[in-house]
Amino acid sequence: MTELLPDLVFQSALRTPDAPALSFGDKTLSYGELAGQIRQSAASFVRMGIGKSERVAIYLEKRLENVVAMFGAAAAGAVFVPVNPLLRPQQVRHILRDCNVRILVTSESRLASLSDILSDCPDLNSVVSVDGPPAAELAHIDGLGWSDLFEKAS
């Protein structure tokens, strides 16, 4: 039997749903909460058109949403592409193009730094900003806020 990383969280959520799974700063997610967010983000990625083995890039600093997005992509059957948050926009562009990334999860400040290169990423369909809906218009790309992932999955 092949298990994916999210399956480990789902199993822990069944055994100890109230136990702390992740903490960052003053925020903590229990295994039950983490499993729920992973399932919801996976369902939203599928609704957004992500297919099996397609790429979801995560361009974030260390934060809870980083883990949820990675595990959510895997639970959706996609491949998550972690993008080093220290890279410059041209380096990020190369990764997005080379990996044929379909969905990018990032922060508003990182998205602002990528505004000049996103039009060079023809496979990129959607950007999810963990800080809320993207402030800038994105040419050929749908923009969503992090909370939209959970509203659309409900």
Image (cartoon, grey):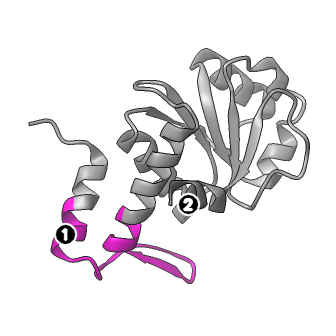
Relative depth, front residue between 40 and 1: 40
Foreground disc of the pair 1, 2: 2
Q: Position of residue 51 (x, y in %)?
A: 46, 27
Please, what is the three-letter code of the amino acid marked with disc 2?
A: Phe
Is residue 86 visible in the rendered image? The answer is no
Residue 16, placed above or below residue 8: below
Q: Regarding mark 2 in the picture, which secondary structure is present there?
A: helix
Residue at the location (64% across, 62% down)? 147
Side of 65 where 113 appears, left or right: right
Q: Residue 14 shows which numbered tag? A: 1
Residue 61 located left or right of residue 18: right
Q: Residue at x 53, y 40 (%)?
A: 47
Residue sitting at x 86%, y 36%: 138
Please state the extent of the stretch shown in magenta in the rendering.
11-35
Residue at image position (68%, 58%) is 130
> Is residue 33 within the magenta segment?
yes
Q: According to the image, label 2 marks what residue?
A: 150
Where residue 82 appears, x then y in whole percent? 53, 39
